[in-house]
Amino acid sequence: MIFIYAIMGILGLLIIGYLWCIMPGKIDYNTREKIKPFTETYIAHRGLFDLKLSIPENSIPAFKRAVEYGYGIELDVRLTKDEVLVVFHDDTLLRMCGVAKKVSELTYEELQEYTLQKTDCHIPKFSEVLKVVKKETPLVIEIKSVKGDRRTAPYLDKELENFDGTYCIESFHPLEIRWYKINRPEVVRGILTSKYTRKITHVDPMVLNVFSRPQFIAYNYKMAHSAKFTFMRTVYEFYNAAWTIKNQKTIEEIKDVVQIFIFDSFIPEDRKVE
């Protein structure tokens, strides 16, 4: 009997520990006010790009077009070899520029030798993008970083020192978000997730919330009604962001549980979220 009680006690502690680890950050009045702009309009994934118009993703024309349409913007930042913060999603140039070279191994000047998807557009500096967006444009900034390199967050923070616009931070890397939790707790932060478990450890990635305590969780829209996030919404208060929505039908299917909609490849029927 004592053995059974001991097992039950251990299981109880494990459950409590798990619930503590996956717990998101505190949502107070200030957080709600800061995140409100992101819930009032749709967020254009990597800008409002359209290759039919020769406007590639994460390009200055894509960001200008999103601003013209009144959408928010999601974009990706990473560091070059000479520590210039650029806006680019992939580790390498292969998909976007047709060259199998890593962004982190090239200087900014070397990157300018290539164009995006056979257009006239080049990889922009993050500082150039900030000059394009309006103060009221909600900016979702995803931090990309090379494994083991945690310099991106402080470099990004430096770039944003004199920016008085609306922005939040997100990343797949909990330690990047932890930097903001420790050094800039006033900035709204989110964690990205696309799978229920990590392939190597088979550990629920949400247990890493213990490091970053995100105020929003951004996940693949297919996970919106999953048992996992239905459970989390029942137990905790946090904002749900869904990516990457490809049509109006999906918006209608998930709007009962999602507050932040990140889309691409179509134009939503309304400019603002109902």
Image: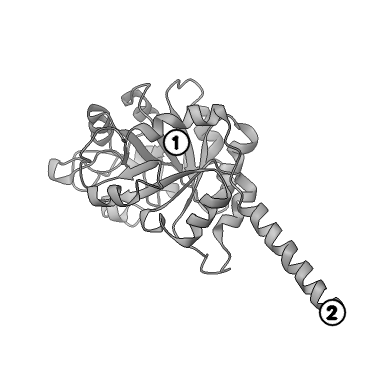
**What numbered label is drawn on residue 125?**
none
Q: Nearer the viewer, residue 240 or 145?
A: 240
Which quadrant is the C terminus positioned in?
top left
**Secondary structure beneath disc 1?**
loop
**Amino acid bearing label 2:** Met
Which residue does the numbered mark 2 point to in the structure image? 1
* Residue 136 x %, y %: 37, 23
Is 66 on the left-hand or right-hand side of 187? left
* Residue 241 visible in the picture: yes
Front-most of 91 and 209?
209
Residue drawn at x 25%, y 30% is: 64
Furthest-front residue in view? Answer: 1
Q: Nearer the viewer, mark 1 or mark 2?
A: 2
Would you place residue 250 above or below residue 125 in this image? below
- Any mark on residue 84, and which? 1
Total marks in image: 2
Residue located 51% across and 50% down the image: 233
Residue 103 image point, x, y percent: 40, 48
Q: Is residue 132 above or below residue 104?
A: above
Neighbourhood count class around disc 2 (C-alpha, 10 Å): few under 14, some 14–19, many 20 upward: few
Residue 69, x across and y down, in percent: 23, 30
Give the quadrant of residue 100: bottom left
User: Position of 251 compared to 103: left or right?
Assistant: left
Dot placed on the residue nearer the N-terminal end, 1 or 2: 2
> Residue 214: percent from the left, percent from the top?
56, 43
Give the amino acid type for the residue marked by disc 1 in the picture: Val
Q: Which residue is at the front of the view, 72 or 61?
A: 72
For image coordinates 49% across by 27% down, the residue present is 33
